[in-house]
Amino acid sequence: MTYNDRIFGILMIVLAVAYGWGTTQFPEPFGGSEAVGPDTFPRLLAIVLGLSSLYMVVRPDPDNAWPWSRTGIELIIAVVVLVLYAMFLQPLGFIISTTLAVGTLCWRMGSRPVKAYIIGAISGVVVYLVFNFALDLALPLGVLSFLEVG
């Protein structure tokens, strides 16, 4: 049955359009428009998601089935974690939100909880440092805003 891929593809196209529209809501960077701004990466993600979803609609897998077992439950948990990540990114900040999201996803994929959350913390700190200092793109610190320099 090829309907599963087509239904999922259509849902993902809707998500890509909504996500792409959300990138237009970012505030204009100080100093005018830049070639690369805070909306560039999310906009590229929306385009890739839209194109890959369109491919699923046009060329569905002929032999697929919804994973309504433990795998399906894990997929639902992953979606819930990512939605919560987006909701708490601003108030909790990038480092804490990323630690919780990456840690939970690693744990759900079989890592020991302590190890999973250590990996999440390292990921959050490293990505924060890369974005803030190497790419000069600010990420929210949230409750850790007392660590801001300057």
Image (cartoon, helix red, strand yellow):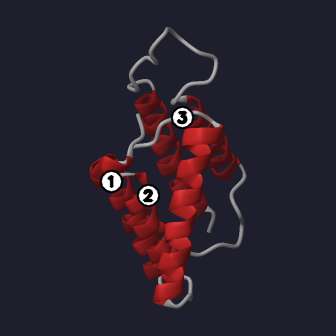
Q: Residue furthest front?
A: 150
Q: Residues within 10 Å of mark 1 (few under 14, many from 20)?
A: some
Q: Please name the amino acid that badge 2 sits on.
A: Ile
In-front residue for pair 80/31: 31
The CA distance from mark 3 to mark 2 is 14 Å
The amino acid beneath tag 3 is Leu
**Label 2 near label 1: C-beta < 8 Å?**
yes
Which residue is labeled 1 in the image?
144
Q: Earlier in the sequence, mark 1 or mark 2?
A: 2
Q: Residue at x 56, y 82 (%)?
A: 109
- Report the residue marked by disc 3: 137
At label 1, the amino acid type is Leu
Determine if residue 17 is in view: yes
Quadrant assignment for the C terminus: top left
Q: Picture coordinates of residue 31 (x, y %)?
A: 49, 10
Give the quarter of the figure containing the N terminus.
bottom right
Residue on which disc 2 sits: 95
Q: Earlier in the sequence, mark 3 or mark 2?
A: 2
Q: Residues within 10 Å of mark 3 (few under 14, many from 20)?
A: some
Q: Secondary structure at mark 2?
A: helix
Left or right of residue 93: residue 69: right
Q: Nearer the viewer, residue 118 or 64?
A: 118
